[in-house]
Image (tube, helix red, strand yellow):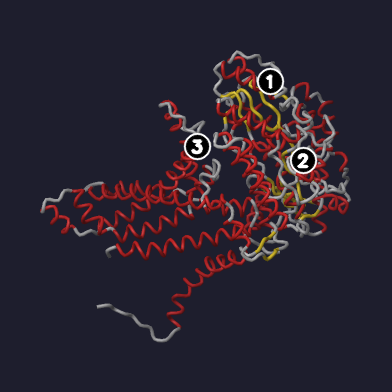
Amino acid sequence: MRKSLIGALLASATVLSPLAAYAETEVQFWHAFTGRLGELVKAQVEEFNNSQSDYVVVESHKGNYSETLNAGIAGFRAREQPHILMVFEVGTATMMSAKGATKPVYEVMAESGATFDPNAYIGSVKGYYTSTDGEMLSLPFNSSTPVLWVNRDAFEAAGVDPDTDLSTWQKVGETLTALKAGGEECPLVTAWQSWIHLENFSAYHDVPFASKHNGFAGLDTELMLNGEAQVKHLSAMGEWARDGKFIYTGRRNEGGANFRSGECALFTESSAGYAGIKAEAEFDFDVRPLPYWDGVGNAPQNTIIGGASLWVLEGHDAEEYKGVGEFLAYLSSSDVQAKWHQDTGYLPITAEAGEATRAAGFYDENPGTDIAVIQMTAKEPTANSKGLRLGSFDQIRGIIDEELEAIWAGDKSAQEAMDSAKERGDTLLRRFETANN
Amino acid sequence: MEKRVTFRGWMLPLLLILPQVVISAVFFFYPAGQAIWQSLFIQDPFGLSARFVGIDNFTFLLSDPFYRASFVTTAVFSVLVTLCSMVPALFLAVLADRLIKGSGVYRTLLIWPYAVAPAVAGVLWLFMFNTRVGIISWYLGTLGYDWNYVLNGGEAMGLVVVASSWGRISYNFLFFFAALQAVPRSVIEAAAIDGARFWRRFFTIVLPLLSPTTFFLLVVNVVYAFFETFGVIHTITAGGPQQSTTILVYKVYADGFVGQDLGSSSAQSVILLLVVGLLTVIQFKFIEKRVHY
């Protein structure tokens, strides 16, 4: 194998790790987690390494989700790819189309002989990462879904009852007006606008985001995010932005800082925001299901996941794949999953882990942490709410972000912006189709 | 009289220029050739298959109104960066040149920002102008100005221009300062005796004598604004809001490294290469005529 700079860096990281012993088979694992999440991943890897003596998993952080995917692809092109690569849900279509670069998880598991039951995973999570004939292609790792976070102290300060009903956007709209009137400067803030207010919005109201079952049924899919339901929601959000009731802070999760510091009253964010909010918030908060428009589509249907899964890359020895299989089996075990769910606020992605968590009394001690689970699993997913599988989706999200900014700034109407997003996104989908046919 | 050194034979001169040729070949001609080659294909991200499409990548780009708009954004950005980094540099150099004592200290202090990498400079400016924690945003707020570069394209452009120019002022200062030192004192003194005041001497004598330096900096700064400002834009605005700070080189990155669309990204690199080449030719053909060496 050719040694490159990356290889050398990895090698030096290995030397520094006290666990590395050269007699053991090494498994490289590239991920995108820093901070608290990074520590938790490190702890998982350490526990696995200590639990047996045949394999050593070497974890390394490769930047944010986009950068990690990019590092994996660059690694593959230079024949320096890791065994396991963390890929966010947006990159799923890219990975699925890369036959010859990826080794499906069901194959790895069958060859390694590790105990593994794909049916242990809850349907809405598994569905995202399985092929059309039901085979698991990548291992679900961290999954979350958007919920509504409430700063109860801010409600009190503005003279609004913090227990007020926030189940629908109609009611949220009235509440925003009351909050604003009560002197609240930042009634509503959001993270991941496209994911929450378009992708999940569409699933939750059971309206299509893209044709061909949101891309699950073929590469010749077209965006349908300029539908009536989406435009209605974005028009309302645009009005709230103009009235200073919805404050735009940026394309990623910048709004988290505003909410955690107590500036904002309501925050639409991933359920995985729990760890950070719990650690930093010096106010009384609670969590509610994501609101829906009463009377629009079939709301509430179910929300979809965000997060990442683990892909196994081609080009390594059979012995090494055995180690990969062992590690993935360890990760999917119920104990590891339950601990991960409780520590992070990510969903318990196996049914057993959810039950174990409930039995341990976690939901009673931390009320609201099961809302995300209920919201995702209450109804059987439809073709519109199974998830999204679109090529070049990272770029399409960029386009959506730009068009949403045009709405918030008042430069375009919601209809104009979404028509333009559809047109621009479809061009990229056609290019992806050409490149992967 | 011009002096010429001539070599006997070919070996030695070839050997002497070899390092430069090798470096150019490895770091310029090879990657540029690759870009031209890849711009003719549509490839999947992993490089498993490539389809020859001729000039389709170019027609795809040029038919995209957002890509064409990016040319205008780039032009505005580079003109502003060039102005904002050269004018203050010249002003500071003139002031430092007038100092009799302590000009060394000022010189050193003024050169410092050049040592800061563009991405780091971006973060520094971001901290000051961040809508939530930025100290300058806070002052603007107390003055009643609602600073929000996250939604206001003009403010975002202003911020990336300032952040890109800041470190560059040092570089330009250095060249202007050296050039000012080379202006013959006798000419200035003669003009002073004739009664020309400082600014008149500056515009009629000093500035024309600085023209070779100014021209050199003009070319270098335009190239800088086109290619090296990526880090600043990436850390501050990531091209937004909408597309107000998406300059050509940022789009090369976004399509190539985020979108994994190497065909389009390569085609953009080729177009960028042509644009900058053309600009440099224009500068040499038309502006250099007005330079006095």
Q: Secondary structure at mark 3?
A: loop
Residue A171: where, in percent of width, then height? 68, 20
Q: Secondary structure at mark 2?
A: loop
User: Which residue type carries mark 2?
Assistant: Gly
Q: Earlier in the sequence, mark 2 or mark 1?
A: 1
Residue flagged by tag 1: what amino acid is it? Lys
Instruction: Sort mark 2 into few (<14), some (14-19) or many (20+) by Cα contacts within 10 Å.
Output: many
The foreground one among A383 and A88 is A383
Give coordinates of residue B219: x percent, y percent. 39, 59
Both labels 3 and 1 in a single chain? no
Q: CA distance from mark 3 to mark 1?
A: 30 Å
User: Which mark's residue is nearer the viewer, 2 or 1?
Assistant: 1
Residue where numbered disc 2 is placed:
A387
Alpha carbon distance from label 2 to label 1: 27 Å
Q: Which residue is mark 1?
A: A171
Q: Chain of mark 2?
A: A
Tell me: residue A22, above or below residue A46.
Answer: below
Say if residue B61 shows up in the picture: yes
- From the viewer's perspective, is residue A378 above or below residue B283? above
Q: Is residue A37 left or right of residue A49?
A: left
